[in-house]
Amino acid sequence: MSENKKYVLGIDVGTTCTKSILFDNTGKIISSSMMPYNTYNDIPLQMEQDADDWYKTLKSTVCDCLKSCDNPENVVAMCVSTQGGTVVPVDSSFNPLRRAIVWSDDRCEKERDEFIAEFGEPYLYEVSGWFICMGMPVLEAMWIKKNEPEIFSKTRYFLTVPTYVSYKLTGKIKVDVSNAGIDQFFDVRNLEYPQKLLDYVGISRDMLPEVVNSGEIIGTLSHTAAKELGLTTNTILCTGAHDQYCVALGAGLLNPGDSMIGTGTSWVVTGIREKCPANHASHISFSRHSVPGLWGGLISLSSAGSSLKWFKNKCLPGGEELDYKTLDDECCKRILHNQGLIFYPYMTASNYPCATKDKGGTFIGLSFTHDIYDMALSVMEGIVFQTAWMLEAVCGNGLSSIKMTGGATNSKLWVQIVANVTGLPIQIPSVADMGCVGAAMLAGIAGDVFESYSDAAEKMAPEYKTVLPDDNKDYYQKKYKKFKEKHGGIYES
């Protein structure tokens, strides 16, 4: 291997696992690794993780990747894409004082109501770009202050996934704007922490990290981190982005009008804008993109992939052992047969097109003619119908095609349903972990491996497979119309 070869590491610390990919300076994938970690749901509504698991799995997956690298000292830079909004209080030595509270946590209903009574519902949206959410750090800090005062009094910093990981790697804490926005303490338009918000929660400015753009150098690896990862203290760590914006960058969304569907536990529709798309009534969350000068707007369905996993594991015979390929094969046989059956995938609260809090997921049109796989297919369809509706809100009707990334792209059936419902060609990248690709692009730019965003996108662009609508397009578009028509009678009354 050439001594002049340079490498970058793109890492994604997601909601369920950490993935790392090692790339060379031509954009070629050298190696990849994945390791899951636990989310604890010991108490209803509460979702927690051990913060140390984020670093342990990062360390393990990076070490695994480097087994295929002849010259680890030539790893110039690394960058981390992360789940957003998960918070952990730490003491002055950066030791976690409790488990991290995950973004999907729902314990803060009282804190939410108190906050709205004080500020009004639009305030956090206008500041941070995100609707007031029970799982985000502002309300979670309030909950800790009220319910765990001894922990609150010992807290020196409120860290999140990117800042905890950056401390473990470099001894420094900086965060990008997109992650600072979803933490909801930071004003993403005026680039400041509003003092009245800090005063209300009861924390000081120095308990939160410095906020910079994506791709800014945080520092080089500490001696401890370099030794543990098998790298050198010359390796740079730069700020990444909230995972959706790393995925968007990796998928080549560099221009206004570009759009994508990201799939996983949640399904997220992202559209790139030239101007801030702030409008509380639109239900569109907004953030600065990982590409300077651009904005992103998105709507997410938090119970998307998780709804199908729930149905498979809890409702299908032998569900936990049942593989998704078998599920696909059985559901394919039910197309047209389940035409009267519709599923609304609101197993957790959804904001679009209206708030579904306390209403839950719903099957309608169930009859004696349907079997359990008819229902499974309707779960897949309902997730697509809801996503197509979100796509209309974020991107309008002028799209010629759309990129789709994430776990659902492994299902030929699911992708085909997306093509039929939207009536658009669906482009599927050959690399599944696009958050790692976007993070590696940022690392390569920060480490002077790539000259620009366009250079990084050109060199690291994966191949794409295109899935076109098929003969079931008309059927699915009629069923989608019915999904929207019946929605009002269930959720908007």
Image: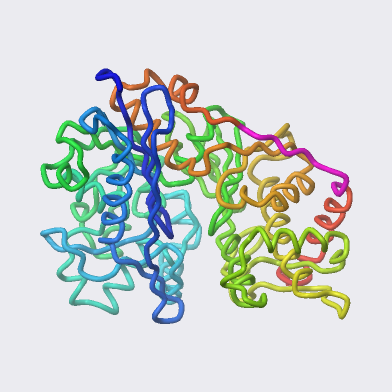
Position of 58 with respect to 310 (left or right) is left
x, y percent for residue 493:
73, 72
The residue lying at 41 percent from left, 57 percent from top is 17
Which quadrant would residue 81 be assigned to in this image?
top left
Quadrant where the N terminus is found in the figure: top left
Position of 219 with respect to 51 (left or right) is left
Which quadrant would residue 375 be assigned to in this image?
bottom right
**Where does the magenta region start and end?**
464-473
x, y percent for residue 358:
60, 76
The residue lying at 14 percent from left, 44 percent from top is 227
x, y percent for residue 188:
39, 43
x, y percent for residue 417:
75, 51
The residue lying at 33 percent from left, 22 percent from top is 449
Examine the rendered structure and indicate whether residue 3 appears above or below residue 221: above
Nearer to me, 341 or 493: 341
Position of 32 with respect to 430 (left or right) is left
